[in-house]
Image (cartoon, helix red, strand yellow):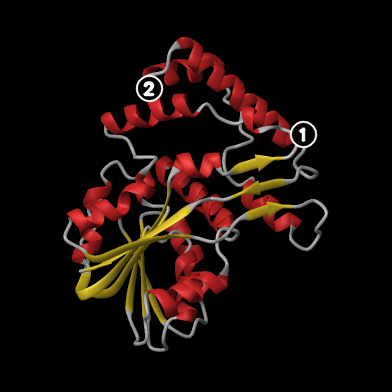
Amino acid sequence: MGADKNWNERIRFLDRSRKTLWNEDYAQFLVERVWKITEPVRVIDFGCGTGFLGALFMPLLPRGSSYTGVDRAAGALEEAKNALAGAEFEFRFIEADLENFEPESSCDLAICQALLMHMPDPGKILMKMRDSLDEKGLMVCIEVDWHLTNAALFIDGFGFENLYNFDALEKIWRNEVLHGEPDRRIGLKLPVLMRRIGLKDVNVRMNDCVRFVDPLNPETHQRQVEGFFSGARTQIPKNRDFYIAALKKKGLTDEEARQQYESKVKMAEYLTQNRETASIVHSPSFIISWGRK
């Protein structure tokens, strides 16, 4: 019960963040010009959370399209139902753990966002998405590559040199994958993984959205602040020694682990102190991969 509650809370802050991760005109461009969806489609959203992708894409799809969202977080699904109440398309939600979920019927479009980066066996989920599709159905995965999204960050007054030690991060991410933990670089790997499970016409783009947290623009500032600060950038680990020991277990030397901790604290303190005044430019670097069954 506690784990589900924690996941519900995580889904909520992810949803707040996602509202600043898309430009609606680019979503429309994908539907109309890239994927060329001209007929009604049956959509299944894996790891739907509060139904963000349904709210984003369904109004852009041909009339008569339907939406099914699947997630294990009951609280998030209740929010999704409320968010889509009154929508002019048919929708339903299924509460299920994706590891054990078996699709009930074939769909035309299987989609997910920021899901596979949290899964210890993304290949298993990819095959479930593929198997949920009707012949020639479209599969779309929208995922982050953590190296790209961490590198594509500028905080005015803080300096690039204070951000991340990427050699240390790569050590951590490689060690996590070796021990069956989620792959933080799954975004860039997805086109290859899609080809391996037999998808055709595989292609890839990047989302065009770039956040600009601009304290001089009152119309967008609060929304961008909420989006950027919805993650863990301002959280300082409560137990320094435990945090450092955990990093060492993931392959870092004692010196690298201490430097990583100090960098995290330095960034968290700066962002906390300058939350309302800092100018920040950040590209979340969502990679959009798709292919057909």
Q: Where does the image place residue 141, in percent across and percent down from the top left? A: 36, 59
Q: Quadrant of residue 194?
A: bottom left
The extreme top residue here reads 254
SS state under label 1: helix
* Residue 279 seen by the camera: yes
Q: Where does the image place residue 53, in percent across and percent down from the top left? A: 46, 66
Counting residues from the start of the chain, the first of labels 2 and 1 encountered is 2
Q: Residue at x 74, y 60 (%)?
A: 220
Distance (Cα) linking label 2 and label 1: 30 Å
Please tell me which residue lies in front, 175 or 204.
Answer: 204
Q: Where does the image place residue 44, in percent across and percent down from the top left? A: 33, 69
Q: Is residue 36 left or right of residue 162?
A: left
Q: Residue at x 60, y 59 (%)?
A: 20
Mark 1 neighbour class, 10 Å CA radius: few under 14, some 14 to 19, many 20 or more: few
Which residue is label 2 attached to?
250
Quarter of the image for the N terminus: give it. top left
Which residue is label 1 attached to?
273
Q: Residue at x 42, y 17 (%)?
A: 252
